[in-house]
Amino acid sequence: NNRRTGFYGYELEVGVHDEDGSWSVSGAKLDQNVPNPFNPITSIAYAVPDGGADIDLAVFNIAGVRVATLASGRVDGGRRSVMWDGTDAHGAPVASGIYFVRLTAKDATLTRKVVLLK
């Protein structure tokens, strides 16, 4: 069981910080975006466990509001990457600041902080 109760009763996913700097849980991995901070575009690499999974890779603002969906649906296992150009779901530029990229795959939820500087 990779779940532990953390502060305020929230469940936390216990994972592994790999040698390459990625964070992995249950075979899913989310690398730190490159470059970070970024302007105007950044690359986000991730891996899906063998056998594939339904995934959701999305960007959220500091208030927890979904800004953009970068990938969603069923994907085969393996490594892949996407680019984020600092725009929202409607193609409008977002403000400079801190954002969070969240990957959900199988029973794993992984999050990375990204910084957009204009």
Image (spheres, rainbow, N blue to C red):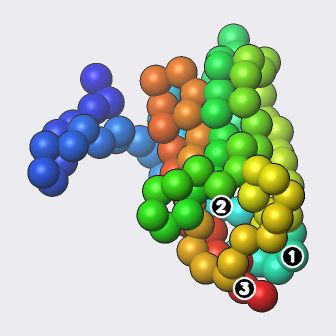
Q: How far apart in space, not on screen, are marks 1 and 3 (Cα)?
A: 8 Å
Q: Residue at x 69, y 78 (%)?
A: 95
Say which mark, if any, is on residue 80.
none
User: How far from the left and from the top, in percent, is residue 30?
Assistant: 62, 47
Label 2 packing within 10 angstroms: few (<14), some (14-19), many (20+): many
Q: Is residue 23 above or below residue 14?
A: below
Say which mark, if any, is on residue 32.
2
Q: Nearer the viewer, residue 21 or 9?
A: 9
Q: Earlier in the sequence, mark 3 or mark 2?
A: 2
Q: Are marks 1 and 3 in contact (CB under 8 Å)?
A: no
For the C terminus, the quadrant is bottom right
Label 1 packing within 10 angstroms: few (<14), some (14-19), many (20+): some
| Residue carrying label 3 | 117
Q: Is residue 89 above or below residue 75?
A: below
User: How far from the left and from the top, in percent, is residue 55?
Assistant: 65, 27
SS state under label 1: loop
In the displayed structure image, the side of residue 5 where residue 102 appears, left or right: right
Say which mark, if any, is on residue 40.
1
Label 3 packing within 10 angstroms: few (<14), some (14-19), many (20+): some
Q: Are marks 1 and 2 in contact (CB under 8 Å)?
A: no
**Identity of the amino acid at label 3?**
Leu
Q: Residue furthest bottom?
A: 118
SS state under label 3: loop
Q: Nearer the viewer, residue 28 or 94?
A: 94
**Residue 12 visible in rendering:** yes
**Identity of the amino acid at label 1?**
Pro
Q: Earlier in the sequence, mark 1 or mark 2?
A: 2
**Identity of the amino acid at label 2?**
Gln
Q: Are marks 3 and 2 in contact (CB under 8 Å)?
A: no
For the N terminus, the quadrant is top left
